[in-house]
Image (spheres, helix red, strand yellow):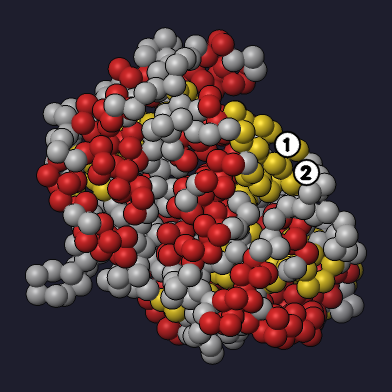
């Protein structure tokens, strides 16, 4: 996973409250065999409205979404995080998030930043015209207009995000122990270590 | 360590701990990973996106099974028959691409070795005693029949195992299911495991790994043991185990991926240590009297809804628990049954002999034994026999079993999961009943509105002959145990 220290750029001034996972990615996209390409289906229902924020060229490719309360509620589908990632979104700023969504977002390297509603109101304004900066190291959100808010993040999640560690990456921190186990197995139980014989 | 008596599960677990974390989670080494087309596409894609490889491709075996149609896969000209369903095709094509890209052994749709993952693993000698085995499928417990610690995992864990050959796990509790005595004539391993689930309930083994113990299992063939362990998940357990013994070793010897030469002797010496020590204790223990087990069928929509074939549909009010009363009533409504109906008067229209529970050669022999020289009843509109693998199919054909089935009026199909879950075109029509040798009688499992009665292969064959659920012993002249 990519290391994240700052997320900087334009933001979609979305603002909607209670955005559920069905809004983020409708159920009929769940049959897919790939994560890639889900971005095209993201917010499908909202995008039927020609004035929607996601198809406004001013915000195309923005890495940040500014949203209302309770973002990502609904089902546990990880597809919601995959869809955002595929759109190029690296961070969501909202007053609150569903736990499952923020867990899935974290697993996929998306930063969820919780800020009070008045900060969200101000960011909605800024996003119309200017970029926003999220500094994960300093735990701050800033704008070109001297706005500055601090946010909380679980230290373990912060560590994983800044080091670019997903669950696989975390396990691979024990790589030398795994290697030692594999060496011992090759030695003591070669019949288990050989498998199909199709080695890399 | 060796002086403390341990259960079989604890021995296999201890042998696979790489690291223990402060919170009690252990990093466990995974020896064997079986991969099929439904739960793997996104796992492989995640590896690709992260630029990762399969850590130990030789410990992974890929085979398509869930989606494959069971009709011929090549046409007269030798060309592959295209898969009509778009989603099925997408998943199958993804596996066909991913396996070679990641260097994993793959038995494709037309290979003789293709079959249901849980049939293929033991058949190839890929599944071995004392190994940790995982697959993105809940019936992975099946491989416990050869003395392996085997359990199902989800797609994100599939990715984790592909990338690291490990899993972060917590140790399960242990449960002993002890069966005393011998099974009566005409009573099979399937009847026994259904009876066990009926006794312990679908939550009976939750949080536990079950070890099946007693003379019955020692006398049982490896294929029978695979059937028993297969349904451990229906009893709530993540895994089921039967200690490996001479029967297991005989079964494995000479199989393609089984150890050879000096390795074989070394392996057998180790496998002989894989049993629960005298004095080891289980967290939970249940005892079953084998003599009480009759040919068993299900009446409801949960695998615990079992009854002897000589019994009747129960009255929902006969259950003590009010939530079970409601569930039983809902089951009967769905199944179109009324309390007090004799089980052996229930007519069936469909027969399915197959699935990872009962599609091995002994299962097919048991069905053929009953069907030999008989024809199916006019009630039967659709009856298919789906061998568990291409090799099982070839063996059955060599023994002439396919002829017995087709002469009787049943269809002989290509290997796969088929009507076990109806992800492919094999489905039971709404409102109709099936006598099925699979493992789940859930609402809609065999097709929307389908009514499933779980049975053994011999009992499915008997139902095919009489057009209703039937005590197979009446056809084979075996004495039913006196009630
Ligand atoms: S046969 Fe049925 S239970 Fe077995 S793996 Fe296939 S779908 Fe699952």
Q: Name, please, the residue furthest toward the left.
A: B76
Whether label 2 touches label 1, CB < 8 Å: yes
The residue at 15%/35% (across/down) is B374
Q: Mark on residue B178?
A: none
The residue at 52%/80% (across/down) is B260
Q: Residue A73: x, y in percent?
A: 66, 50
The front one of B248 and A164 is B248
Asked whether residue B290 is in view, the answer is yes
Q: Mark on residue B285?
A: 1
Label 1 beta carbon less than 8 Å to ligand 1: no
The kind of secondary structure element at disc 1 is strand
Asked whether residue A132 is in view, the answer is no
Q: Residues within 10 Å of mark 2 (few under 14, many from 20)?
A: some
The front one of B481 and A190 is B481
The front one of B174 and A177 is B174
Q: Chain of mark 2?
A: B
In this picture, is B215 found above or below A182?
Answer: above
In this picture, is A132 found above or below A30?
Answer: below
The residue at 88%/69% (across/down) is A155
Q: Residues within 10 Å of mark 1 (few under 14, many from 20)?
A: few
Q: Quadrant of the C terminus of chain A?
A: bottom right
Q: Tell me which corner region of the image, top left, top right, bottom left or bottom right, holds residue B270.
A: bottom right
Q: Tell me which corner region of the image, top left, top right, bottom left or bottom right, holds residue A162.
A: bottom right
Separation of marks 2 and 1 at Cα, in angstroms? 7 Å
Label 2 belongs to which residue? B282
| B50 relative position to A43: left or right | right
């Amino acid at each position: 996973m990519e290391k994240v220290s700052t997320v900087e750029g334009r933001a979609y001034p979305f603002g909607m409250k209670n955005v559920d996972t069905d809004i983020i990615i409708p159920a009929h996209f769940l049959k897919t065999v790939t994560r890639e390409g889900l971005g095209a289906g993201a917010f499908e229902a909202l995008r039927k409205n020609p004035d929607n924020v996601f198809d406004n060229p001013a915000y195309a490719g923005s890495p940040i979404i500014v949203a209302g309360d309770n973002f990502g509620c609904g089902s546990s589908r990880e597809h919601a995080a995959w869809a955002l990632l595929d759109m190029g979104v690296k961070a969501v700023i909202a007053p609150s998030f569903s736990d499952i969504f923020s867990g899935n977002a974290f697993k996929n390297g998306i930063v969820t930043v919780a800020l009070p509603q008045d900060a969200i109101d101000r960011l909605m304004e800024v996003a119309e015209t200017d970029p926003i900066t999220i500094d994960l190291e300093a735990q701050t959100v800033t704008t070109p207009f001297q706005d500055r808010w601090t946010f909380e993040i679980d230290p373990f999640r912060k560590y994983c995000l800044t080091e670019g560690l997903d669950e696989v990456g975390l396990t691979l921190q024990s790589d030398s122990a795994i290697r030692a186990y594999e060496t011992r197995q090759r030695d003591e139980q070669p019949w288990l270590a050989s498998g199909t014989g199709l080695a890399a | 360590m060796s002086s403390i008596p341990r259960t079989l599960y604890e021995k296999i677990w201890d042998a696979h701990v790489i690291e223990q974390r402060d919170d009690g989670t252990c990093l466990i080494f995974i020896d064997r990973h079986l991969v099929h087309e439904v739960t793997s596409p996104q796992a492989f894609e995640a590896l690709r996106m992260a630029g990762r490889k399969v850590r130990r491709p030789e410990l992974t075996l890929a085979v398509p099974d869930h989606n494959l149609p069971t009709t011929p896969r090549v046409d007269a000209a030798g060309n592959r028959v295209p898969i009509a369903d778009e989603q099925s095709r997408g998943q199958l094509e993804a596996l066909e691409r991913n396996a070679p890209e990641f260097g994993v052994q793959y038995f494709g749709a037309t290979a003789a070795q293709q079959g249901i993952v849980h049939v293929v693993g033991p058949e190839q000698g890929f599944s071995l005693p004392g190994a940790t085995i995982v697959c993105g499928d809940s019936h992975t417990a099946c491989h416990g029949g050869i003395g392996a610690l085997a359990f199902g995992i989800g797609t994100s864990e599939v990715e984790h195992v592909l990338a690291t050959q490990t899993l972060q796990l917590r140790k399960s509790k242990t449960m002993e299911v002890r069966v005393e005595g011998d099974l009566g004539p005409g009573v099979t391993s399937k009847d026994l495991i259904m009876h066990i689930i009926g006794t312990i309930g679908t939550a009976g083994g939750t949080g536990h790994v079950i070890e099946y113990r007693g003379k019955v299992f020692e006398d049982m063939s490896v294929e029978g043991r695979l059937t028993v362990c297969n349904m451990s998940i229906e009893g709530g357990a993540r895994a089921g185990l039967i200690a490996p013994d001479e029967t297991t070793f005989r079964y494995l010897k000479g199989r393609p991926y089984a150890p050879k030469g000096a390795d074989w002797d070394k392996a057998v010496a180790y496998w002989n240590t894989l049993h629960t020590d005298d004095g080891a204790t289980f967290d939970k223990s249940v005892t079953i009297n084998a003599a009480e087990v009759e040919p068993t069928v299900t009446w409801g929509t949960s695998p615990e809804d079992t009854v002897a074939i000589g019994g009747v549909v129960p009255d929902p009010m006969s259950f003590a628990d009010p939530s079970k009363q409601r569930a039983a009533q809902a089951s009967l409504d769905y199944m179109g049954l009324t309390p007090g109906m004799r089980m052996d008067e229930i007519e069936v229209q469909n027969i399915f002999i197959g699935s990872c529970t009962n599609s091995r050669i002994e299962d097919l022999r048991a069905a053929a034994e009953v069907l030999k020289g008989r024809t199916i009843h006019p009630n039967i509109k659709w009856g298919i026999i789906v061998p568990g693998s291409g090799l099982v199919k070839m063996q059955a054909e060599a023994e002439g079993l396919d002829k017995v089935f087709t002469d009787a009026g049943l269809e002989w199909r290509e290997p796969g999961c088929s009507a076990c879950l109806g992800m492919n075109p094999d489905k039971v029509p709404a409102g109709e009943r099936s006598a099925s040798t699979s493992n789940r009688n859930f609402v809609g499992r065999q097709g929307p509105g389908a009514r499933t009665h779980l049975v053994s292969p011999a009992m499915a064959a008997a139902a095919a002959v009489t057009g209703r659920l039937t005590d197979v012993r009446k056809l084979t002249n075996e004495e039913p145990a006196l009630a």
